Structure formats: structure tokens, C-alpha cells
Image: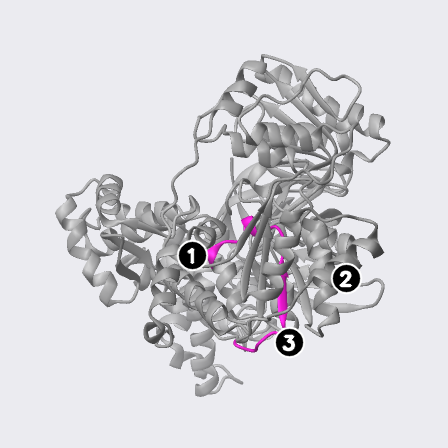
Amino acid sequence: MKLKGSIDEIRFRNDENGYTIAVLDVEGEPIVAVGNFPPVSEGEEVEVFGEYVIHAKFGKQFKVSDIKPITPQTADGIVRFLGSGLIKGVGPKTALAIVSTFGKDALEVIEKFPNRLATIRGITPSRAVAISEAYLQNKKAQDAIMYLQSQDISLGTALKIYKFYGDETEKIVSQNPYKLIEDIDGIGFVTADRIALRQGLPTNSPFRIRAGLLHELDQAGENGNTYLPIDELVPLTAQLLSCEQASVEDEIDGLVIDGKIKSVDIDGTRAIFKRFIYQCERGSAAGLARLILESNRIGYDTKADIEHFERRNGVRLHEGQKQAVVAAISNGVSVITGGPGTGKTTVVKCIIEICEKLKISTMLMAPTGRAAKRLSESTERDASTIHRALIKDVGQFDYKTSQKPLNCDAVIVDEFSMVDVVLLNMLIRRLRSGTRLILVGDKDQLPSVGAGNVLADIIGSELVPTVMLTHIYRQDERSLIAQNAHAVNQGKMPDISAKDKDFFFVKGRDAAMIAKTVVDMAARRIPNYLGESAQKIQVLCPVKNGFCGTIALNKMLQEVINPIGKQITSGEVIFRVGDKVMHTANNYQLEWVRKEPYYEKGEGVFNGDTGIITDVNRASGEITVLLDDGRNVVYTSDTRGELMPAYAITVHKSQGSEYVGVIIPITGGSPMIMTRNLLYTAITRAKKFVALVGDEYYLKRMVDNNYIAKRYSGLKTFLIELYNDNNLLYGEI
């Protein structure tokens, strides 16, 4: 729907994102219009496109999806436009004087003949030039934004682009739209390519081919790879761009010379990395090799200390647990791995006590806030996320420059299977020589969401002492969770016959009915059974799409668990006060405030942080979230894209977390997704209760499916190479 009128009043405007509430005069009728506007002023003529909506509090409004400013045509409109304050140096009196002198030609005079303004009393030649420059600056902004909109770019994104490029917007975007990918958050290859092709850029343009190569490497990274073999990268890019493979090969060396990519030999294969990922993986390997080679090995007999720990805590360590303690105390880097109930936490507690006796200061870390909180509770020591530990001593975090060593002698990282190569490199850079790095995790869980195969590569290098705990140390006769998790991990069907324990299977064949059952169990049946809030029950989905994916289930769960309240719409997602949400990116600049137990301010909210929405502000577009660790975060329209509903999340997103109860829909799906270790990972997230809902046939298929997607990673190769060649190691930057 289209409306045409003049802006009678601007009630609210956020200059950061252009969100505006304005009253339009449309043929004498006042209409409230809301949306993202380019720079506009009262009195300006506009065409707006959108639809009428009914706001619960403010009534009927016109929701603007697009807007086109129109140069005012009437003398009255020009006076109001010039006198609105948009043009610096021109107020209502000056505007009236200009229009009285030049009439409908006033804007043309300001733009093309500013010296004529000096004929008006009170306007000096220098002021006339300033007025013209201010007018032209505003016109350039509107022209640039309209140009971007003509390229099928949304108004909000257009404002973001103009804010970054300014007067160079049209020049840069017309010459090389692919530069947008590097400079503007939210613009990827698909958008930039669409703009380029609309402008007639040749399909075999070097700009396009280089952008395509980088895009394929980015896609590979999202699938966990740190590099692609050139024999895979070239055909993938050629297929994406519909061009010859020879043209793609011709651009690779240019990207290497420009420093965008790195080409190295890995096991006889020419591997192509994005330069940053290469630096992270190579840097991680160099740091690990140094810690292994430079550690002050302790010839210390831990037997008496272990016995003391056993007596004091009323436990008896299994032989494997004792070996893990000795390895951690005696080596620069060590790995402790095992499934649920194998006593990893007990080992960590014993290591900490011995370190404290030996005056070895320790720091406890985990990849997510939930995992760090659980580690702190189980050890009765302070623990934090890796990101927060790295930020703490240096203020605002900069992974490229921060070199200040952490003030500790040993670092223990729990849930290490979640750590990707970028996060590992951040941590390694901060560890001084001689620091012990103790890595604790479950090698059979899903690998990290981010790029890298870190835990598997470190174990596979055979340079790091690794203790695999297999004895189930924690075993409750009444609990089937640990028992069934180990059964699944061994390729055996879980026991789903019990009806009075903590592991249930609810049969269902139709996906829509399975989804309905999952919602009923998560919102009503399981909370009542456990005596817990529905917010503590977590639905874990193998996929995002479909009846039983996170997108559909989040909508259904929200309408049952939290159906009413203040809300705001962001894209296709409704955020409502009381909703459970998750942060989905690492944002080092996002500010937070903690009010209890003492006031604290800081920056940095990270992928996997979860919380509850406590307030929404429709006028400003802000969403306030109280994170699980007590930090308050305000999301604006620029950052709320990093927020997602979290009643249902993917199994990958659940890594490192533990929930009171877990519900897992079991349906058909791609064998590359519906795998044994995905099911195993989901089950091991539960503390008190697991419910599988679906078809037993598909459950058996998941248990039988031991498919593990191959990840291309260079950490193992680099670590062995650098460890074996000390001269090469100490030449690393």
C-alpha cells in the first residue's frame, strides 16, 4: 500500500538506526507512520509503502517498509523543510526570508547558486556557502540511500552502509559491491552478488571470483573446516559462480599475495585457508608446542596426596582417575576425557587440591556461562567463561593485540570439546611459559560449532598425555541417563522400557503430532512431574526446520508457556517479556551491567549465553535481557539479530550446558545430521530427566548411524611439525 503526504511532526527518531515515529499529513488526514526512515525533516514530502497495523497501546499506525523522499514543491512546504532544523544555519525566519526572495526556486538557488543567498539581509557570503554545503550533504545522504534502495537493499541496511561509507557510498558500491561483505555486518556474498549482477558486473569479474572463493571458505568454516583442499575449493566456487574452473584458479595466487588467504601443504594436499583462521590454527599449534616443551616437569609423587583427598572426601579413585591426576600435575599439557559418570569432576577437584598444596595457582574455565557455573558449583571454586577470563585483566578485549599473560600457573578448561580453533588461540596467546594446561571433556560429543577439530587433533597428535576414563564411577541404580548414554555411545539401543524412572520414550509417528506432544511435555507434564519451572526444561532438536525443528517449536512453546505480555517483532520473530532467549554470536563490545550482589559494568556477551527478557521498548526497539549469570544486557535494533528464542535449541547449541530435564524429538532426517554422537550429546545434557518423543525406527537408525562428518583441520599437522622442529617453533610469530 502506498501513501503520499508531508511530514507534519516527528515524534521520535533514533539516528543510529533511523527508527522514526512521524505524523504524516495525507490529504488533510493525520496518519502515524513508524519504521526506519532516511534523514527527513518536518515539512518534507514523502511517499511511504507498507500496511496499517493496530498497536495494542497506540492504536492504528502505518508500518513503513519503504520510503521515498520527494522534493517539496510548494512555497509553504519549502519553508517548513528549510526551517525544520535539518539544515544547519537555517531556522524558520531564515527559511521564510529565502523563500520570500526566491519562491519555488529556493532549493535550486541553495544547491547551485549559493552566492545569491548573500543578497538576503543577515546572510553573509560565508554563511551562504555553509547553508549550501549543509543542504548538499543532506541531499547526498538521501540520494545515496535511494540509490541503495534501488539495488534492492532494505532501508535499515542502506542506512548502515551510508553511515560507514558516507559520500563515497555510491562510488564504492557501484565499483565493487563485494567490499560490502568485508565492511558491513549482515551483508554476505548472496546480497553483494545480486547487487553486482544487477549493475552488469561480468560473471567472470576478478572481484566476483575472489568474493566467491572467500565465500566458499566461509561456508566451509561454518561446517567446522579450517581449510579446503584446492581440488574441492575450485570446483565448488566454479559451480557457485557458473564460471570456468580455470578462471577460479587464476585468482587464488592473487588472494594469497593480497594476504586474504594462505596456501600450505598438509599431508601432500594443497590446503587453502582464510588467513585469519590459518593464523589461529598455526598459532594454537605453536603455543601448545611451547607449553609441552617448556613446562617445568614435576618429579612429584602424588600418591600420598591422592590418598589424603580420598580420605577427606570419602571417595575412592579408580586407577584411571589416579593416572589423570598424575598426568595433569606432571605435564605442560594434558587431556582428561570420558563420558558421563566417569568421574571427571572428582579428578578436577583432586588436581585443584594438590595444586593448592604445591602453591600452583589455578584458573578454572569453560566455554559457556552455564558450564562455568556448573564447574564452579562442583569444585566450590571460582570459574568463568574463557572469554570473560581473557577480558578481565585487559579491559576491552582485542584478540589481535592482547598479549598480557594470565596471572596463574595452571589453567583447567572443562567441556573442552566445544572449543574451536579461534577460542583456543585466544587462550593460548595468554599463557606464559611453564603454565600447565589441563583440558577436560568428552571426546565422543559433537565437535565445536566453530571451525576446527581441536580436541581430536590434540589427542591424535600423540604429543599430549591423554587419559580416557571409561569406568562409570557415578552410578545411581535408579537412574538410566548415564547408563543409556553409554549404551548409545557403544552403538546399543537405550533401555526405553522403564515407565517409572528418569528416561522415557513416548511413541509417535506423525511429525506434527510429535511436535504437539513435545510442547505438552515441555510446558506442562514434565514441569509438573519434576516440580520445576517450565523454563528449566529444555527441548533439544537435531535441526532448525520442519515441524520438529527449533523455529516451529519455539513459536509453539512461546504461545503455551508465555502467551501474553509486552512484545516486539524482529523480522519473523516475536520477543516477549518473560521469554527464554540465547545470544548467538561473540560480541566483544556489547555492554552489560550487573546489579547484584554488587554493581559492575563491562563489555562482552558471547555465543551460548542465555537469559530471560525483562523488558521491551517498542519506540526505541530495545530489548532488555537478564542473563543467567546476573548480567543485564540491552539489545538495540542493531544487535537484537544476535538474540534468538531458546525454549527449543539445537543440540549443537546445548553443548557445555546442563538442564534439569531434556526433551528430544526423534524423527526422520538426513543421515549426516541424525547421528549417534548427536543423540549421545543430547542425552548427556540432562541432569534429572530425559524424554525421547518419536518413532522407535528412527531412534534405532540414529543409534546405528556412526557417521562423523570429516573436518579439514591442520592443528594436528602443525603441532607435530612445530614440536619436532624447535627452530621452526621459535621462529613463529
Q: The residue tagged with tag 1: helix, strand or loop?
A: helix
Give residue 145's mark.
1
Circle count:
3
Give the camera-side residue of 240 and 157. Answer: 240
Is 220 located above or below residue 497 in the figure?
below
Does residue 635 appear anywhere in the picture? yes
Q: Which of marks 2 and 1 is nearer the N terminus?
A: 1
Where does label 3 land, which residue?
407
Residue indicated by mark 2: 381
Q: Is mark 2 on a helix, strand or loop?
A: loop
Q: What stretch is highlighted in magenta?
A: 403-421
- In the shown orientation, is residue 710 left or right of residue 494? left
Marks 3 and 1, how far apart in space? 50 Å
Name the spot of residue 286 as percent of width and height, x first: 42, 68
Circle 3 or circle 1, nearest the eye: 3
Residue 722 within the segment the image draws in magenta? no
Badge 2 or badge 3: first in the primary sequence: 2
Question: SS of the residue at dot 3?
Answer: loop
What amino acid type should be assigned to the residue bearing mark 3? Asn
Left or right side of 237 for 688: right
Do the residues bearing badges 2 and 1 touch, measured as CB atoms within 8 Å?
A: no
The image position of residue 50, as x and y in percent, is: 54, 39
Q: What residue type is labelled 1?
A: Ile
Figure check: 199 above or below 78: above
The reply to whether dot 2 and dot 3 touch (C-beta < 8 Å) is no
Residue sitting at 67 percent across and 38 percent down?
Answer: 472
- CA neighbours of label 3 inside 10 A, class few (<14), some (14 to 19), many (20+): some
Q: Estimate the x, y position of residue 550 in percent, counting from the top left.
A: 59, 32
